[in-house]
Image: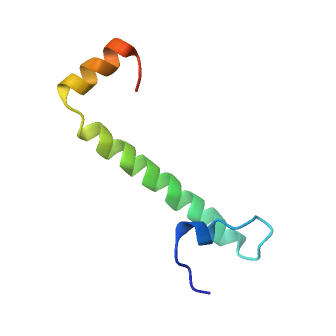
Amino acid sequence: MKLKTLKDLMKPAHCKNYAMLIKAGDIKQEAIKDIKSIMELEKTPSDKWWEDMTGHR
């Protein structure tokens, strides 16, 4: 079975490759954490100030 994208892994739960679904979900969560940490590192002081003033993160 050749997989092209993460969506190929995220098929319905009744498929026979359930372990792959679990692994894909873990990979997706790790990627989201990595992206959020990169975005946090790239913030300028004015971005942080704006978030503090507006309450948005």
Colouring used for the render: rainbow
Q: Residue furthest left?
A: 45
Q: Residue furthest top?
A: 53
Q: Residue furthest bottom?
A: 1
Residue 38 image offset from top left, x and y in percent: 30, 46
- Closest to the observer: 8 or 22? 8
Query: What is the tally of numbered marks visible in this picture?
Result: 0
Side of 11 where 54 appears, left or right: left
Image quadrant where one finds the C terminus? top left
In this picture, is 8 found above or below 57?
below
In this picture, is 36 found above or below 15?
above
Q: Residue furthest right?
A: 14
Residue 17 image offset from top left, x and y in percent: 70, 75
Side of 18 where 6 appears, left or right: left
Q: Quadrant of residue 9?
A: bottom right
In this picture, is 7 found above or below 36?
below
Q: Residue visible at 50% across and 61% down?
A: 27
Q: Residue visible at 25% across and 26% down?
A: 47
Side of 4 where 49 appears, left or right: left
Q: Residue visible at 57% across and 85% down?
A: 2
Q: Quadrant of residue 21?
A: bottom right
Side of 36 where 13 appears, left or right: right
Residue 35 image offset from top left, x and y in percent: 37, 49
Image quadrant where one finds the N terminus? bottom right
Residue 56 image offset from top left, x and y in percent: 41, 22
Q: Residue visible at 18% across and 25% down?
A: 45
Q: Quadrant of residue 46?
A: top left
